């Protein structure tokens, strides 16, 4: 069974601070996706990384896929209250002809003004 | 595109009642799925479909039925609601991008069973 562990589970910071959240597994994934979920809404896909060591930037958000494709990190620079939400990582893997997405349980981020 | 839509947004049922959660997508995605999200448990896959007429079970299928008569629609039926089915339900569809898939979620249905 593939598992994705996210840390920390909860994070409360002040506006303007930097933060990093982590997504770790003992399994290798063909892709790693990050989603943000706001209260009362469904998860929204932010980014997909597919190559070991890949780094993608989305404004103040930086996503990195580990060299061995077993882990990923999300770094937010100068966090804003609008960044508040549940951040989910999901690992994609193939089992025969089936593609499976394994979700972590998420990091709940609160950015206080 | 409206993306993935779900109705209703909220629902309260009594134990033993049945109901259908509706899901539709207008992106012509072959793959659709249903998840439930519970505190501390994350997203858990209930059922999925790889195309019209084809469905299969996920990790928590008991108490739920699905069918897929068209590419666009993928309803989830609760046969006899139980308090353990109190949860937030998300429908999703996905499409292939290179050798992987990207998934899109609906806004969710919050279900309470009393």
Image (cartoon, coloured by chain):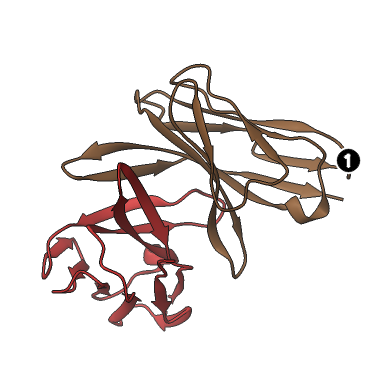
Q: Is residue A32 visible?
A: yes
Which quarter of the picture shows residue A57? bottom left
In this orientation, which residue lies closer to the viewer: B26 or B95? B95
Image location (x, y in percent) of residue A4: 39, 70
In this orientation, which residue lies closer to the viewer: A14 or B97? B97
Which quarter of the picture shows residue B39? bottom right
Quadrant of the image containing the N terminus of chain A: bottom left
Quadrant of the image containing the C terminus of chain A: bottom left
Q: Is residue B23 above or below residue A3?
A: above
Q: Is residue A12 above or below residue B65?
A: below
- Direction top: furthest residue: B70
Q: Is residue B107 left or right of residue A81?
A: right
Q: In the image, what residue occupies the spot 51% across and 49% down?
A: A41
The letter of the brown chain is: B
Image location (x, y in percent) of residue A89: 36, 63
Q: Which subunit holds the residue at mark 1?
A: B
Q: Is residue B21 left or right of residue A100?
A: right
Q: Is residue A16 visible?
A: no
Task: Find numbered disc 1 in the image and state the secondary structure of the residue it sits on.
Answer: loop
Image location (x, y in percent) of residue A3: 42, 70
Q: Is residue A59 left or right of residue B71?
A: left
Q: Is residue B82 left or right of residue B78?
A: right
Circle 1 packing at 10 Å, graded few (<14), some (14-19), many (20+), is some
Q: In the image, what residue occupies the spot 54% across and 55% down?
A: B44
- Direction front: furthest residue: A96
Q: In the image, what residue occupies the spot 66% across and 34% down?
A: B65
Q: Which residue is mark 1?
A: B16
The letter of the red chain is: A
């Amino acid at each position: 069974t593939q598992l994705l562990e996210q840390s920390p589970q909860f994070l409360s910071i002040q506006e303007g601070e930097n933060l990093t959240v982590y997504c770790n597994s003992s399994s290798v994934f063909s892709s790693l996706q990050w989603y943000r979920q706001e209260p009362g809404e469904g998860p929204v896909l932010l980014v997909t990384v597919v190559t070991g060591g890949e780094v993608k930037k989305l404004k103040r958000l930086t996503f990195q896929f580990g060299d061995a494709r077993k882990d990923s990190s999300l770094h937010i620079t100068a966090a804003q209250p609008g960044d508040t939400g549940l951040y989910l990582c999901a690992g994609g893997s193939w089992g025969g002809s089936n593609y499976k997405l394994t979700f972590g349980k998420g990091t709940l981020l609160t950015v206080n003004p | 595109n409206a993306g993935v839509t779900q109705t209703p947004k909220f629902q309260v049922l009594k134990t033993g009642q049945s109901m259908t959660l509706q899901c539709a997508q207008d992106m012509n995605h072959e793959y659709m799925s249903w998840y439930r999200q519970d505190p501390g448990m994350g997203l858990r896959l209930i059922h999925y479909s790889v195309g019209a007429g084809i469905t299969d079970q996920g990790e928590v299928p008991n108490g739920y039925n699905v069918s897929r008569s068209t590419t666009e629609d993928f309803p989830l039926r609760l046969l006899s609601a139980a308090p353990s089915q109190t949860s937030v339900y998300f429908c999703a569809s996905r499409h292939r991008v290179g050798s992987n898939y990207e998934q899109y979620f609906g806004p969710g249905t919050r279900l309470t069973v009393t």
